[in-house]
Amino acid sequence: MLWAHQDSANLGLHVLAEGTASLIKRVWPDAEIEFQDYGKGTAPMPISSPRSLAKEWVTGNRGLKRWIQSFDMVIDTRSGDSFADLYGVERLFGMGMVAELVHRAGVPLILGPQTIGPFVSAAGRALGRRSLHTAAVVMSRDSASAGQAEKLGRPVDVESTDVVFALPQPPRTAERDVILNISGLLWTPGPHVDAEHYRRTVTALYQELLRDGRSVSLLAHVLDSPVADNDVPAIREFAAAHARGAEVLIPASLTGVRELLASGSMVIGSRMHACLNALSAGTPAVALAYSRKFAPLFQDLGWNHTVDLRSHPDPVAAVLAACEDPGLDRQVRSVLAVAEELLAVAQRSLESFHRDKVQ
């Protein structure tokens, strides 16, 4: 499995690894799965440098081709949302080159359920088109992604959903009230949203929730680590400035964060997988969206509680209104049913691919 790892401090990537593995195990219960991210895995060399990959493909000195050919298939996750030029063409090119080498090694490449696009540059579209056409099976996790693939001339084989719904569901306790996830990715200046606007929004939201008599716990959805977008420093800074008495929840594992999310009556998440982890645990979640990947995925599940920080004129009011929806628990139950149907479609596609391959 490419571009996801069980040891990632980013719990979204951890979900991607565990959830994709769970989907694979539904089809092949005895499958042996190895995870390969940039710096973690069993590859005989780092796979982060296109120049090094090209040299190795010519010389074969380090055994990369033999390593690829030791697998029955390769599942390419593209880190969930990196099959796009959103993070730059270089990242797209590097990941695409590994996919190309898998194809040239004669090993089936499956693009697992993920966001496809957007591709805003000519180079991005060309790279995206090539990866789509080298894949034996292409799965999207939302209809907008399927549309992007269609535009590039390689329709998806499966419109599925996020693999978080393939994970075991923790018991829902609802012992806490509102759980607010603050994102280190958005707290500091970056390309997604204006950091000052984000800080003002979560501060006003926290204060309004308290005025409404709600109890609010603060949650990190990235494990405490040296990574640049760590949630923990952002939450501690927020708590020191605005919420000295608030409960701060810092998980130590994916299982731990899912149990914490299942302990809330409501989750407000700045990380997409904080919301998806919550929904898959049966807890209503309002997403503070910062990219195109949010809304189509949630809407395809029948969940319409997404507030786009980039465009909504009053995100605080929109979140508070969503929190007051009396039908949230019923809607979550519907989401879980739809998600299971969409995962079953992905499962049947893998089973069909396997039968065709064997024949």
Image: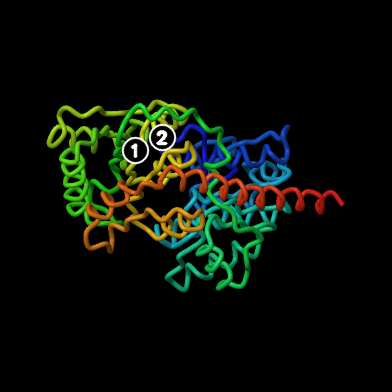
Residue lying farthest left?
241
Residue 279: x and y in percent read 45, 42
329 to the left or right of 105 = left
- Identify the residue at horizontal 42%, vertical 70% (top origin): 120
Residue 73: x and y in percent read 70, 46
- Identify the residue at horizontal 30%, vertical 47% (top origin): 324
Q: Nearer the N terminus, badge 1 or badge 2?
A: 2
Of 181 and 280, nearer the camera is 280
Q: Nearer the viewer, mark 1 or mark 2?
A: 2
263 to the left or right of 19 = left
Query: Relative to 236, does residue 311 appear above or below in the rendering?
Result: below
Residue 2: mark in rendering: none
The N terminus lies in quadrant: top right
- Identify the residue at horizontal 81%, vertical 54% (top origin): 356
Label 1–label 2 contact, CB within 8 A: yes
Identify the coloring.
rainbow
Local SS, label 2: loop
Local SS, label 1: loop
Residue 177 in which image quadrant: top left
Residue 271: x and y in percent read 36, 45
Residue 145: x and y in percent read 52, 62
Residue type beneath disc 1: Val
157 to the left or right of 244 = right
Residue lying farthest front?
326
Residue 9: mark in rendering: 2
Query: Relative to 334, does residue 41 appear above or below in the rendering?
Result: above
Q: Which residue is mark 1?
A: 227
